[in-house]
Image: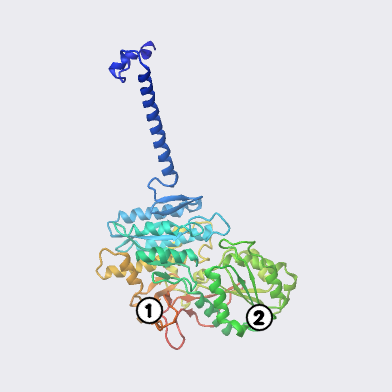
């Protein structure tokens, strides 16, 4: 110990200081040096902490934003423990794609990856099903001569962090696995349109939405796999005409939030049915009421239907147009069940609720909702993009069952058939996300067939615009699980005269719109509705 205290043995100390008595200057210099080193180390540590504190991953691909991790990555990250399984499968397929020796392209799945609040853009189940559908399409596409890597692109549960995501995607347009497209975009929301208009559009990256339907969601770089709201409502109009639905005792209940989807749906119902069906905002004999939906930020308590239902039942409405989202339907039915003025005998004409949806909402189809519908003699008629239960049960020769659905369902069951949710396909999201990626994959394959080795985002954009359903899809139809389709460029035939409205619609051509009834399954008496098909004028190939 004495040797340790003997300064003459301290070899790290300069020799001249080891063999002399330390003066005041020496002490000050020594402690100044120690303080400087300590301060520098602490500052470096704090700076490093501050930099890494803002990121969720060591490679800084995901940045913290409140309780979420925002950004773009090809590696599985635990956005939500319920998604770990499917994210891990996609990561494994990404690694297999990069190791395949084939040319690799990247496609981003742009959407929320968590659902922490009631007003989140997507529920946890819809996020899971969407990723499962994209994975099934990825596996199928990777059997071809070009492999697809999926990127997890999290814009946040309220869709507000789109700029971080689109900047990252624009930066990935080059390299060994260039970004050639983005799919997803689940909500008809201002943030969705801004992501394309101000982010992907200027970068010329095509965006293929799986489920957007609002006609306000239009941009030259935004393709939609879903029929538009106008087409859904047009399909309902044909149903009403063909199935003797009561046209006099009508009523409309609409979500009054300033939301693109519900605002567009309100306009479509009024335009298609309007005065002919009595759903006008007449001040004296008003046949419309509103409520506030649960989706998105808004002031006040959502899903209060008491006043609207009381008014609807007071006039003994038999046909009700519901302009709202799926999540609002169960509380609407529960309010009807609690309202005494809605009581009616089972022999009366049923109360028909006409609405639109991507698929069959699992909550609405629950045993509890079935009992409410049966008890109150309610029939729900939904114009949908996907009718998975009927397509699964469809007998051979059923012309309304899409040809590619059986192959998709078999692949889905192979990968996810042991999952605890046997009705996972009913909401339609797995099917529609599969079809969005299949559309991109079809465009990539078409570019390769044109002897393009290094396919870029520009090539994919060009091919997405070129398909045609003519000659039984010889010109590049997308073999979607929800039906074969191509995209129409409405601007090509738009009136360019002064004062005319600009049209940038890129909607699916020949997309089926099946009619779904609940609680009793009824077969529609009218032919299957196909988008842009005009009976007696043109004809779509079999779905």
Q: Which residue is identified by label 2?
A: 282
Residue 179 at x, y = what percent?
34, 60
SS of the residue under disc 1: loop
SS of the residue under disc 2: loop
**Front residue of 156 and 422:** 156
**Front residue of 371 and 239:** 239
In the picture, the disc for residue 342 is none
In the picture, the disc for residue 469 is 1
**Front residue of 72 and 97:** 72
Asked if residue 414 can be seen in this view, the reply is no
Colour setting: rainbow
**Which residue sits furthest right?**
340
Residue 145 at x, y = what percent?
29, 63
Res 24 → quadrant: top left
Query: What residue sits 40% from the left and 81% below the top?
Result: 494
Asked whether the residues under the numbered discs 1 and 2 touch, taking CB atoms below 8 Å apart as contact, a structural biologist would say no
Query: What residue sits 65% from the left and 84% below the top?
Result: 248
Q: How would you rate the neighbour count of disc 1 (Cα within 10 Å): few for under 14, some for 14-19, many for 20 or more?
A: many
Q: Earlier in the sequence, mark 1 or mark 2?
A: 2
In the picture, the quarter occupied by the C terminus is bottom left
Alpha carbon distance from label 1 to label 2? 44 Å
Query: What residue sits 55% from the left and 81% below the top?
Result: 272
Q: How many marks?
A: 2
Residue 214 at x, y = what percent?
50, 72
Residue 411 at x, y = what percent?
42, 63
């Amino acid at each position: 110990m004495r040797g340790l205290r003997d300064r003459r043995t301290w070899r790290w100390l300069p020799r001249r200081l080891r063999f002399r008595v330390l003066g005041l200057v020496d002490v000050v210099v020594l402690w100044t040096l120690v303080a400087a080193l300590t301060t520098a180390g602490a500052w470096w540590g704090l700076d490093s902490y501050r930099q890494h504190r803002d990121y969720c991953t060591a490679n800084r691909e995901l940045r913290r934003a409140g309780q979420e991790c925002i950004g773009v990555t090809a590696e599985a990250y635990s956005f939500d423990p319920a998604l770990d399984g499917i994210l891990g499968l996609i990561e494994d397929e990404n690694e297999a794609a990069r190791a395949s020796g084939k040319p690799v392209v990247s496609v981003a799945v742009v959407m929320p990856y968590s659902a922490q609040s009631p007003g989140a853009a997507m529920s946890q189940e819809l996020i899971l099903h969407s990723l499962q559908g994209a994975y099934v399409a990825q596996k199928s596409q990777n059997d071809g001569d070009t492999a697809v890597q999926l990127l997890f692109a999290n814009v946040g549960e309220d869709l507000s962090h789109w700029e971080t995501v689109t900047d990252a995607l624009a930066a990935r347009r080059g390299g060994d696995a260039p970004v050639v497209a983005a799919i997803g975009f689940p909500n008809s929301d201002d943030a969705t349109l801004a992501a394309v208009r101000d982010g992907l559009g200027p970068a010329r990256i095509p965006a293929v939405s799986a489920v957007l339907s609002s006609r306000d969601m239009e941009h030259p770089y935004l393709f939609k796999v879903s029929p538009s709201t106008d087409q859904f409502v047009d399909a309902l109009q044909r149903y009403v005409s063909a199935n003797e639905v009561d046209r006099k005792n009508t009523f409309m209940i609409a979500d009054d939030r300033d939301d693109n989807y519900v605002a567009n749906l309100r306009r479509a119902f009024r335009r298609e049915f309007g005065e002919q069906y009595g759903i006008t905002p007449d001040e004296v004999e008003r046949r419309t009421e509103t409520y506030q939906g649960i989706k998105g930020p808004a002031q006040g308590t959502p899903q209060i239907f008491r006043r609207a239902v009381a008014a609807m039942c007071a006039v003994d409405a038999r046909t009700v147009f519901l302009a709202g989202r799926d999540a609002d339907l169960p509380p609407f039915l529960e309010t009807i069940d609690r309202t005494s003025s809605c009581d009616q005998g089972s022999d009366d004409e049923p109360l028909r609720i006409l609405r639109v949806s991507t698929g069959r909402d699992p909550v609405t189809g629950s045993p509890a909702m079935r009992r409410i519908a049966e008890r109150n003699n309610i029939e729900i008629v939904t114009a949908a993009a996907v009718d998975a239960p009927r397509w699964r049960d469809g007998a051979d020769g059923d012309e309304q069952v899409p040809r590619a659905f059986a192959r998709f369902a078999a692949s889905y069951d192979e990968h996810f058939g042991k999952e605890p949710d046997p009705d996972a396909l009913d909401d339609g999201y797995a099917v529609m996300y599969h079809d969005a990626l299949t559309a991109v994959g079809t465009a990539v394959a078409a570019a390769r067939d044109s002897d393009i080795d290094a396919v870029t985002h520009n090539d994919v954009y060009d091919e997405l615009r070129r398909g045609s359903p003519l000659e039984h899809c010889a010109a590049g139809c997308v073999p979607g699980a929800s039906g074969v389709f191509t995209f129409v460029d409405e601007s090509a035939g738009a009136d360019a005269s002064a004062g005319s409205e600009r049209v940038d619609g890129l909607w699916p051509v020949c997309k089926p719109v099946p009619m779904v009834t609940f609680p009793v399954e009824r077969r529609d008496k009218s032919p299957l509705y196909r988008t842009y098909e005009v009976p007696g004028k043109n004809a779509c190939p079999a779905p």
